[in-house]
Amino acid sequence: MSYEFLLQLIVNGIVVGLIYGLIAAGLALLFGILHIVNFAHGEMVMLAMYAIAVAVPLLGGSYLLSFAVVMVVAALVGWVASGGLLAVLSSKSGQMGIFEKSLLLTLGLSIVLLNGVQYIFTATPMMVTTDIPAGAFTFGGVRLSYGHAMAGGIAIVVFVGLYLFLTRTNSGRALRAVAQNREAALMIGLDPDAVARRAVLLSVVLCAVGGAILIPLYVFQPIVGQALILKAFAIVIIGGMGNVLGAALVALGLGILESVVGGFADIVWQNAIAFIGMIVVLLIRPQGLFAPAMRKG
Amino acid sequence: MLRNLALAGAMLLSASFAADAQETIRIGAAMPITGPVAHGALQEKRGLETALEEINAAGGVLGKPLELVYEDNQCNPSVAVTVTTKLLEAGVPAVLGQQCSSAVLATMSLFQRAEVPLVSSIATNPKISELSGVGGNPWVFRLNPSDRELAVANVNYLASLGTIQKVAIVAESTDYGRGGADAFAEAAKQKGLEVVSTDFHQLAAPDFTTIIARLLNNGAQAVAVYQAHADNANFARQAHAQGLKAIMTGKLSLDGNTFAELIQQGAYDNAVTAFPYSPAVDTPENKAFTAHILEKYGESATYETFAGYESLRILAEAITRAGSAEPAAIRDALEATSYKSMIGATVDFDDHNQAHNNAVIITVDDRVLGVKDVFPTK
């Protein structure tokens, strides 16, 4: 096995890791702020892919324009959905707590979205030909397709933006404050509901970006979200539930590890890594690698 | 008052079900209506519905209309066991489909225990016919050729090109993928082709870059794939983007718009596959069938559409010959099947309840999909 082969695997892994990261970040954000697990997260990514598939022919075949339009629509949908979600979660009806309600709600939503999309578009594999060229370029003996390069590039921009937003803006700091301690945030005058709405919106937009960057790479079906979400769950658990940047780092590491292990060992191990990692982390550091230390007892 | 009304309603409803049960012959149809291979069920259902309409329009079977009872097995072995049990408990005298090898292999014993025939028309794992018929399970029949027969034809064609010495295998990690991969490796060995790598990936795998990196590195001149439609399209798209020049072979289902687009873009240049069916097979019956499907559904017929259509036709004919809709009589009649398939051969079953229909060699030359050869699998 050559040095170039190893380098190729690492570069592939970085791109795949960045894509995983985008999907896992939205999941982590929702858990951090609202303490809910969104089982419909994968279906939201899938919905974004179908939205682009519909938008591209309507917008004269332009992928980038469709990308932009779908982001705006996702933000609007996120804003409206956040209102509805918070209203349902805070309603006093029934005996269920927020976590149980969110489980049923998002699981139900996932089933409705998956089957709804299959009903409308059928399960026929779908492909969107974009204006991103289909070929690859070579640097230092490593090949990278234009689609993968674009996906990786956009993911990096989004992560840098997310990092700056969370650490340098008041809105972002408010998100982190509510994630750390909801009551204390309330005491210093933050409105947890407004912050939560922003978190839902951001999470929906992250899903949409995740779906959109997969368009030039994938042929997809309504089930596509299910394959992605399981790994995103493992990433969020390894990184520490609710830690957005932790999730991003774990995703990157996992992408590289999967690629290298798959390259040198049997490909079936590739899928096992995330879950072996998850089990090990749950045994040794159950709060996740990047979560602050937990007080026992 | 309300209670009485509800009771009356319930009685009426059950009476109507009972009337239905008396008037129709209900046939089970298990297939992956949801899940990663749901595309195949959509196509199979089109074939089944087309055959059903024709049979019922001609007066049904034994003077009764046929009725199909669909169940979703998701191509998942455990779900397949659940829905098959449901069908068998509902008392259907025969079941069509299951579609995936894992679902057939998981449910074969249920059919034997219930003494109800299963007519499988798409699953290709060679083990199914090894376990059926003489010395095995007499209740399971298979219409399509197994991957062993197809792999031999495929490798023979590849070897005849004279340019391919190194082949790689990429397959889904299911009974279908593993059965196909074993059959291809065995056939390649017989012909002196070197298998340079074998990769089994999960069904509905999102990313193939690692496998593609290996193939770019190990000098494979052809890649034999045993994957679900969507996985293969995904793999081909990513491999083409990464510049993999190895030709695609193995089991390629290249019908439909997505594949047409990928072929146009060059993702399947020089591809060759031995396949059970092509809408382009030039017989008057197949031409009429594909024209009808295209008109009815706006999409070309696929292997699954063909399989669904002929499986119901063959079963209906067996019930007619049996003169009874009892499972044992249907099984005996199935054994004596002699059905003229729309792709040319006469379908009859050997000792292992395996039929030997024709199959086709399909190639992509100059980015055009075409049938190179129609060959017997007997």
Image: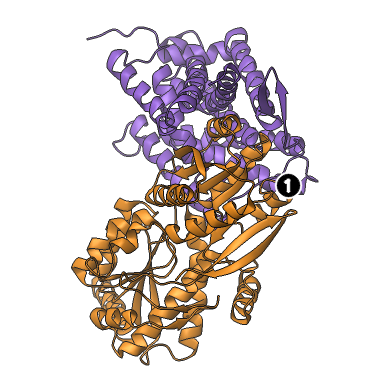
Question: Which chain does purple denote in the image?
Answer: A
Q: Which chain is orange?
A: B
User: Residue B259 at what x, y percent from top left?
Assistant: 64, 53
Decide: few, some or many residues near mark 1? Use Cα within 10 Å; few <14, some 14-19, many ≥20.
some
x 48%, y 52%: residue? A115
At x 67% / y 51%, what residue is drawn? B270
Please, is residue B294 above or below residue A234 in the view?
A: below
Q: Label 1 lies in what chain?
A: B
- How far across and how far down the image is residue B24, in percent? 35, 84
State left or right for residue B156 relative to residue B354: right
- Is residue B58 placed above or below B48 in the rendered structure? below
- The residue identified by callout 1 is B265
Rendered position, B190 above or below B282: above
Considering depth in this image, is A26 or B285 the residue closer to the camera?
B285
The part of the image, by quadrant, that contains residue B278 is bottom right
Number of labelled discs?
1
In depth, the one of B3 and A88 nearer the eye is A88
| Residue A119 relative to residue A233: left or right | right
Q: Quadrant of the N terminus of chain B?
A: bottom left
Residue A38: which quarter of the image? top left
Q: Position of residue B55 (x, y in %)?
A: 47, 85
Q: Nearer the viewer, residue A87 or B32?
A: B32
Residue at 68%, 32% (x, y): give it: A147
